Image (tube, coloured by chain):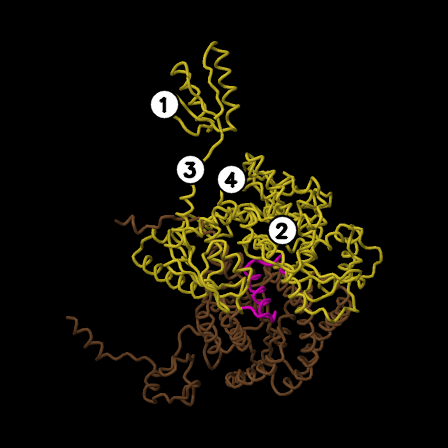
Chain colours: A brown, B yellow
Amino acid sequence: MDAISDRAFTETAATTAQNIHKVIDETPSLLTVILDVHPLEWKKYMEQNENVEFRHVTSAMLVMLNSHLALNSGNEVSVYVANSFYHGAKRMFPVNEEVLAEESVAVKKEKDTNGSGIVGDNDADGDDNDGDDDDDDELIKVRPKTKTGGNKKKKSSLLKSRGVYGQFKAIDEKILDALDEMYKVEPDRLRQIISKEKNFVKGTMTGAISTALTAINKLQKSDDKLNMKARVMIISVSGDNTLPYVSMMNTIFAAQKMKVSLDVCKLGEKSIFLQQTSDATNGVYIDIKHPSGLIQYLSSALFIEPLLRPIVVLPTNTSVDFRASCFVSNKVVDIGYVCSVCLCILSMVPSDERCPTCFSKFEHKLITRMKRKPKVLPLEVKKKKKTPE
Amino acid sequence: MSTPQPPGSSNSQGDDESVDFFKSTINEYLDNLPESVHQQLFQSRETCLAIFRLLPALSKFYIMAVLFNETSVPYSDLNRWVKSNKNSEFKGHQNPTKIYQNDSIKRLKALHILKEIKRQMIHPITKQPTVIIFVQLNEIFRQSFRDALTGFLPDSTQDQSKITLASSKDDQQEKTTSLDMMFDDDVDNSITVDYLDRYCLAKWENILHFMVGTEIKEIPSVGALTLLRFSGLMELPSDRERREALDGQVDEDIDYGYEDDNKKSIHTLKQLLITKTGFQFLLQDISSQIWTLLIQYLIMAEKLKMNPVDVLNFIFLLGSLELGQGYAISMLPQTQLIMLDDLQDYGLIYHQKDSSVFYPTRLATSLTSESSSFKTASAAMDQEISQPRADKSTNSGSIIIETNFKIYCYTSSPLQIAILNLFVHLRARFANLVTGVVTRESVRGALRNGITSTQIINYLETHAHNGMIELAEAEYNKKYEFESSIGNTTALEQLKLEILPPTVVDQIKLWQLEMDRVQAFKGYLYKDFNNDFEFEKLLSYGEDIGVIVWRDRTKRKFFVSQEGNSQLIDYANKIIRNSSGTPRANTPA
C-alpha cells in the first residue's frame, strides 16, 4: 500500500543537492569588518614589529572588502572601528545621516554600559610624553597615505568614467575619508586622555561588535534582505586586558544565537577571549605571524563565506583556552572564587567583601572560613577513620 | 569546439533539456570558447570580474585562496580544504559536496583559469620520484583580477592608470589619453534612474508583448525582430511553410534564419509568428531571457565577423557600469559602436541619436548579477515605476495554485496574463487579480504548442506566491524533523521542497505523458532473413552498437534507427562477402 503514497515522479537526490548548492552560489552576504584602532595598543604593537604600518593593514582590509564585493553583486560590506574607550566605537561605513543620529545614541548607551570599564588598573609605567610622541609618529605615518588618498579622489572622479569599479571606489574612498577624518580629531583627544590617565585605556571592541550585530540583525529582519547571510571579521591588536569580560561574553552569546560567525585576525599577542569568540560562533581564529603577508591570510583563511562553512574545513586552532578572567584584576584565572549571586569570577576576595559586579554583600563568616588556612585536626581524623569500619 | 551549437537546434534531445538550455546560457558559451579567446578575454579586468561572479561559490573560494599566492598549489590541497562528507550538514545525500567540488574545479579548468602542472618530485621518505599535480592560476587572469581588486591602492594609482591606458591602447581605443573623455559632465539631467527604468522595461516588455501577439502601438525595431527570428524564437509564415515542407528536419529549423535574405523589411517582419522555443522562452525569468538573447546575439555577431572578444567585453563592461551615469561613446571601438545600436533595441542601453553619451539601463547593469539578486532588483524596479500595476507583478511571486487546480494570480500585467493564458483556462479578471483553472484541455493546448510540463511547473514554482513558499517550507521542516527523529535516511534523501501541490505537479506530468503515447522513430526494418544465424549475428551486432529500436525474434524482424543503418549495412555486406549469397532485405520504413 505504501507504493500509493509514494511520489509518482521522484527526482534524484542529485538535483536537490544541486539546489542547495545553487543557493550557496547565489545568496548574497554581508561582511562586517571591525578594525581595532586603539592607539596605545597600536603603539605597543608597532614597537614590537617595526616593519608594520597601520596603512598596510587598512590597504589589506580594503582589498578584502573589494574581493567580497566581487563575489556577488548583492554582497554588502560594512566597517566599524573600535577605538580607545574615550573615542568609542564607530561605524565608518556605510555612512548614513539617519544612522549617525542613532549612532550617537548608541555610543552614549555604550558608555553607560561600559561604565565599569574604565576601572582598568593603571599599572602601565611609560611616562606621558613618550606616549604622546609616539602617537604623533603614527600620525605622520598615516598622513601621507590619507593625503594620497585625497589626491586619488580627485583623479578617480575622472577614472570613474571607466566606470569599472565604481562601486569599489566609492566604498574605498568613503572608508578612507572616514579614517582620515578620525585621525584629524585623534591627536587632541589623545593628548587629553594621556594627560588624564596613564598608558592603559580600555578598548571598545565589544561595543563595536554589538553595534555591528545590531546592524546585522536590523538588516536580516528587513524585508528586501531577508535571507542575507552575515559574518564579522575582527582585526585586533589589543591584548585581553582591554576587553571587558562580561560584555565580551554577552556579545559572543548574541552572535551565537544569531548564527553570525565571528572571525578573528589577531595581530600581536594571543587573545584568549577572541579565541573563545571564534570557537563559540564557528568562526576562524588566526594569529598573524607574518604581518607582511596579511592579504594572503585575509583572502584565504579568513575569506570563507557563511554558506560555504559547512563544506570547507575551517583553518582554525582546535585547542582553545577556555579560562575566564578575574573581574577585578583582569588576570586569567585557573582556580578562583565565584559570586553566588551573579557568577562573577574573582581571583581574590575583595577587601570590602562585596561583589564588584552586583554589589551583593558576602557573608563575613563564610569568607573567614574560606580564608582559613588548612589545619590538621587529629580528633576528626580519628572519627572519620572509625566510621568506615 | 569553437562554435557552440545555437541553443535552439539542440531541441531534439528531449524536452527536459530544453529547459536547461536557457539556463546554462552564458556559462556554457564561455566554457566552450577556445583557450586563446579566454586569454584575450582575461586581459580585460571587468571581464575577469564578471566571469568571477558567474562561478560557483567554491570556485571563487579557490581563486581567492591562490590569487595572492605566487607559488603553485598541490592539487591534493584543493581536496583537503573541503570537508569529507561525514561532517557535512547534508546527510543522506550521495555525496553532494564531492559533486559540487568536482563541478567547481571543472568549471575553472574549462575556463582555463586553473592550469594543471605535473612535476617530478622526490618523495622525502622513500626517495622515490613521484609525479605530483600542481595547480596554477592563469597568469593573465591573476594579473587582471588582482588589478581589479587592488586598483584603488594609493601607491599604485600611477601604475594603475598606466595599466588602464596600456590596456586600452591594446584595444586601439585610446587615441587621446584623457580619461575624462568618457565621463561626460554636461549630462542631461532629465535622464534619471527612474526614467531609465521605465524606458528599459517598456522596451523589453514591448518585445515580449510582440512575441505573445498582444496589440501594441509600437512594434520592436528591425534589429530586435531579426534577432528574434535568428534565434528561432519567432518565424515568418514563409519560414513555417518551408519548415513544414521539409517536415523531416523539424528541429533543424534555425540556421537559415539569418543567412538568406537578412534584410527583411519591417513589414515582412511584422508578420513574425511565435515558435515552440519562443513559448518556452516566455516562461523563463527575465535575466535568463536577456542572456538567451545575448548569446544568440553573440552567435549572430560571429557570423557577421565581429570579434567575439570585443562583444563579450562590452557585455561584461555594461554589467559593471553605474546606473544613471552617462558614458561617452567616443572611447568605444568600432565593434562596440555597432553593438550600441543593437543593444539599444533590446532596452539594455539608452542612447539618443547623435548624442555622445549613452546610459546603461538596469537590464544592463544587472547582467552579471545572479538571478536571485536580479529578482529583487527588478522587484525594486517595479516599485519605482509608478504604473497602475500590482505592487508585486511579473517578476515576484504572485501565483497561488490549489490542490483543486484553481489558480489565482495577483497581477494586472497584460504580459503575465497572456503567458498564463498559454496553459490556464482563465475564468475571471479583477483589478489586480486573475483567476482560472488548470484543466486537461488547457495544459494539452500548451503541450501542443511545444511547452513542456517541466516548463509549466518551473514557471509556477518561480512565480509562486510567498504564502505558498512559506507553507511549503513549514511543511518541509516538519517532515525533516520527523524523518530525522526516526532516523529514516532514505526518506530524507527523497525529501524536497514542494511549493506546488504534488497532485497538481503529478497531474500536469501525466497529461504530458498522455501526449507521448505514440512515439515515432525514423529508420529501417530488417526482415526476411534467410536463416537464423544471419539474423542473430546482425541483431547482436546491432545491439552492441546500440542502434536497434525494436526486435521480434519469432518473426525474425528488427528495426534499426536511421543513424545506425549505414553501419549495420556495412557489417551485413562484410558477412555477405564472407559467405556469398545471403540476405536481401533492406526496406525503408
Cα distance between the residues tagged 3 and 4: 17 Å
Mark 1 against mark 3, which lies toward the viewer? 3
Residue B346 percent across, percent down from the top left: 66, 56
- Asked whether the residues under the numbered discs 1 and 3 touch, taking CB atoms below 8 Å apart as contact, a structural biologist would say no
Do the residues at discs 1 and 3 belong to one chain?
yes
Residue B332 image-quadrant placement: bottom right
Q: Which mark is residue B13?
A: 4
> Of marks 4 and 1, which one's residue comes earlier in the chain?
4
Residue A223 percent across, percent down from the top left: 51, 71
> Of marks 2 and 4, which one's residue comes earlier in the chain?
4
Mark 3 against mark 2, which lies toward the viewer? 3
Q: Amino acid at mark 4?
A: Gln
Classify B258 as above or below B293. Answer: above
> Of marks 2 and 1, which one's residue comes earlier in the chain?
2
Q: Amino acid at mark 2?
A: Leu
Do the residues at discs 2 and 1 belong to one chain?
yes
